[in-house]
């Protein structure tokens, strides 16, 4: 029996144009990557707020967008300081995570203070939706910049030398250049594992799916499709570790692939739950064949903070 793949042509055409651009920006890093993540964060947040409005929330949209940009900037602050004041500035001693939580705390205070004077419907609904959008989308996705910048000035250079057959005479500047390139490859590997997970789950589910995964939230997803997606994500990270990420051990690649394969799919289900609650099929129609920005990056939003914590405090510690 023939299998119908809805929107396949538009999906492929968008991928042909968008994927190379995303991969190039991810590999280059720097200000381009910061601007890219900030842009998709703002678009996704705007779509989330549009769904919240359908449930009667009067969100503080402008404040939310400013907060998202500031959260993204907290992970890129050291690069900005280095560019403006040079590599010897005392400001480089600022802890990224501390700045992140300071921005988040100030945002909470601002939202609740503004609600004192707005008098627009339910305070709990308005403040709750405003804050949830920034934390769930802005704070979570900003950690993708954190992952990219883990391979900057603070990357342990011993991993570079150990990975390159023990070359001890490698200059620090050269080692840092190699490490930063590895950061681009790491982000690309994460994106590839998410895309392959999504694709394997989609086609595998259509071809072999029989047992429904979560009918209340997403009636078309199956356990078989989910299994295809999980093994696709893990397999992608194994290939990436073997050929492109020499500083990772096999068990670390398995953990990263497992996080993507499990929590990436949970992220997709969570976004489906929001859409079902709001009564919409897609978060928007911005990307032909893919829905909205929120639809396209829902898995990445969910896995980014987990992978940031794992890489920072375990794999690269």
Image (tube, rainbow, N blue to C red):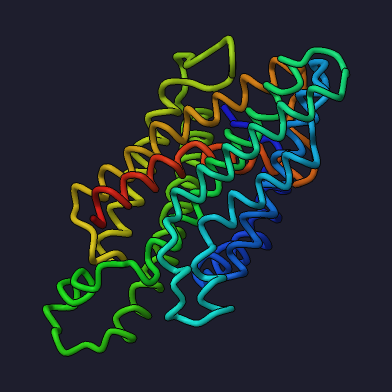
Q: Is residue 130 above or below residue 174?
A: above
Residue 260 locus on image (x, y percent): 40, 40
Among all residues in the image, which is located at the extreme top?
216
* Left or right position of 65 against 218: right
Count of numbered circles on the image: 0
Q: Residue at point 88% right, 18% down?
A: 119
Question: Considering the image in quadrants, where does the C terminus appear?
Answer: bottom left
Q: Residue at point 59% right, 78% down?
A: 84
Q: Is residue 220 above or below residue 66?
A: above
Residue 4 locus on image (x, y percent): 64, 32
Q: Residue at point 48% right, 21% down?
A: 222
Question: Considering the image in quadrants, where does the N terminus appear?
Answer: top right
* Left or right position of 180 against 249: right
Q: Is residue 89 above or below residue 132?
A: below
Q: Is residue 41 above or below residue 88?
A: above
* Left or right position of 118 against 300: right
Residue 191 locus on image (x, y percent): 48, 52
Q: Quadrant of residue 22?
A: bottom right
Q: Residue at point 53% right, 34% down?
A: 202
Residue 74 locus on image (x, y percent): 54, 55
């Amino acid at each position: 029996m023939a299998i119908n793949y809805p929107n396949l042509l538009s999906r492929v055409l968008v991928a042909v144009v968008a994927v190379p651009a995303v991969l190039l920006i991810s590999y280059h890093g720097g200000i381009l990557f910061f601007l890219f993540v900030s842009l998709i964060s703002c678009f996704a947040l705007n779509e989330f707020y549009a769904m919240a409005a359908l449930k009667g929330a009067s969100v503080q949209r402008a404040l939310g967008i400013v907060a998202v940009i500031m959260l993204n900037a907290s992970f890129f602050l050291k690069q900005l300081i280095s560019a403006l004041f040079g590599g010897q500035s005392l400001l480089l001693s600022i802890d990224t995570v501390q700045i992140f939580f300071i921005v988040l705390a100030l945002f909470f205070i601002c939202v609740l203070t503004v609600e004192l004077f707005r008098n627009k419907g339910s305070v709990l609904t308005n403040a709750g939706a405003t804050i949830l959008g920034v934390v769930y989308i802005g704070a979570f996705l900003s950690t993708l910049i954190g992952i990219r910048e883990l391979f900057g000035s603070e990357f342990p250079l011993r991993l570079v030398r150990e990975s390159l057959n023990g070359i001890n005479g490698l200059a620090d500047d050269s080692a840092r250049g190699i490490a930063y390139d590895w950061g681009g490859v790491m982000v690309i590997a994460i994106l590839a594992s998410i895309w392959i997970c999504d694709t394997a789950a989609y086609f595998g589910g259509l071809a072999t799916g029989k047992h429904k995964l979560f009918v209340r939230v997403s009636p078309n997803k199956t356990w078989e499709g989910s299994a295809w997606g999980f093994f696709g994500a893990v397999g992608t990270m194994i290939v990436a570790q073997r050929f492109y990420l020499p500083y990772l051990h096999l068990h670390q690649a398995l953990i990263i692939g497992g996080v993507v394969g499990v929590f990436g799919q949970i992220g997709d289900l969570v976004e489906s739950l929001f859409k079902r609650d709001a009564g919409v099929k897609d978060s928007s129609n911005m990307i032909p064949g893919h829905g909205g920005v929120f639809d396209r990056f829902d898995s990445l939003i969910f896995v980014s903070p987990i992978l940031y914590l794992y890489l920072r405090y375990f794999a690269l510690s």
